[in-house]
Image: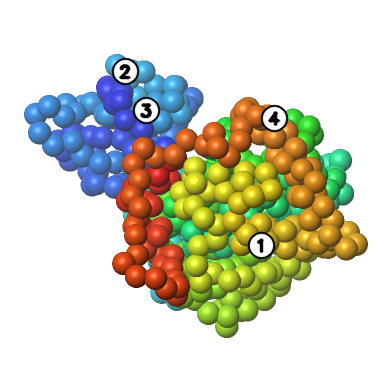
Amino acid sequence: MKLKVKVLNIATRGPFIAILNENTADILNIEALDRILIKKDKKKVVVAVDFSLGKTGIKNYEIGIFLDVAEAINIKDGDAVDVALVPRPESLNYIKKKLDKDELSKDEINSIIKDIVDNKLTEVESTYFVSACYVNGLSIDETVSLIEAIKNNGGSLKFNHNRFILDKHSIGGIGGNRTTMLVTPIVAAAGFCMPKTSTRSITSAAGTSDAVEVLAPVIHSKESIMKIVKETNACMVWGGILDLASADDKLIKLERPLSLDPEGILLSSILAKKLAAGSTHILIDIPVGPEAKIKNKEKAKSLAKKFIVLGKRFGVKIKVLLSDGSQPVGNGVGPALEARDVLLVLEGKGPKDLREKSLYMASLLLDMVGVQDSYSKASHILNSGLALKKMKDIIKSQGGNPSVKSGDIKLGNYRFVFKAKKSGKISYISNNLVNRIAKLAGAPFDKGA
């Protein structure tokens, strides 16, 4: 059937959506969330259908097209398109199979991930996959298949001139902990390549990219990243814009509402992005604490073993650090406060816990690539100002102001000092409460909160 296009000023940047009048849907025998093929000339796209209700909606024999669908096949307002019902994706049967506690094959997992990347599954359908992984778990073989599927259905970075590509990742769940922003310039100043691609906040008040963005732009093309790394040995950019493991970013979006973080998806999410960036040596930080993502050492040790096993399966060297996740790291929680902490440490001041943890992690990475007396080497780079110089180089190369100092960081306009009613020692700091307060104040979207 031919329908007239009405382009709607809406975009999902996710699953493709089109809108039909209920009468037109009845004629086509289409129900809500059915899929239709929209074809114009030689271009075509499959979209999910929703209905328009009321007199001011989509008219009979009209089809409402979201902006991202219109861009995909170059449709304009008033164009005529051919529309036909199409079968539901086979990947839905595989999602149901996982819900029924059956193990998925490599091809089945790849089919699910490919359909998520190609926007062939609605958010509801994709969420069922996340839920199935959360409730029923993934085997090591399924996790390997998921890593390969996420990696193979996304982009990649290649740094052929470098023998070693170093990287680190923290499982997260605690406030502050901006070690990446210190480890990266230390390792780069030591002469090693560390192209760091990071996520934005998932459950915390700030992700690494949120904090780096206070100092410099984090959205760069692949070509720009190659140039930044060539100039500085490192970068600290947001991985989402690159389509590096783009399925992972879609899965993270689905996990966020209920703060779900299935172990198999967590492992796959981290390693797929590292492999897509060409990493050869990876340090994994697992904070352990009552309010961290990983609550106890037994669980942390089990997760660490899986990282190492998976590393061997993919031919990369992985070291795992079990760190203290009982309280926030650093003095600030929220993008601007965390960026200020980093600059303070680089300037020779700042929080001692953030400084010491970052030095230790940098030394572990340097040790992995054969640097002798690695802790002394890392300490010298930080204490001598070489790390600060390297950080300024990275900031400049990414388009920020290399002259920025800790005192230049703009914080929120409002503050409240809570005064204790009696003297004593703080016995406990709630990570969850600190994160929640920071998020209620506007973090990470309001950088100064």
Q: Position of residue 165 (x, y in %)?
A: 78, 50
Quadrant for residue 58, please give it. Answer: top left
Q: Separation of disc 3 and disc 2 at Cα? A: 11 Å
Quadrant for residue 366, please give it. Answer: bottom right
- In the displayed structure, does residue 67 sit left or right of residue 166? left
The answer to whether 414 is drawn above or below residue 324 in the figure is above
Q: Position of residue 135 (x, y in %)?
A: 42, 73
The answer to whether 346 is drawn above or below residue 94 in the figure is above
User: Which numbered disc, 3 or 4, marks the residue closer to the eye?
Assistant: 4
| Dots 3, 4 in contact, CB < 8 A | no
Colour setting? rainbow
Q: Separation of disc 1 and disc 2 at Cα? A: 57 Å
**The one of 108 and 319 positioned closer to us in this rendering:** 319
Residue 360 appears in the picture as rendered: yes
Q: Which residue is mark 1?
A: 357
Residue at x 57%, y 83% (from the top left corner): 298
Give the mark, 3 or 4, whose residue is nearer the N terminus.
Answer: 3
Q: Quadrant of the C terminus?
A: top left
Q: Which residue is mark 4?
A: 397
Name the amino acid, label 3.
Leu
Q: Quadrant of the N terminus?
A: top left
Q: Which residue is mark 2?
A: 77
**The one of 188 and 283 positioned closer to us in this rendering:** 188
Residue at x 35%, y 53% (from the top left corner): 417
- In the displayed structure, does residue 61 sit left or right of residue 230? left
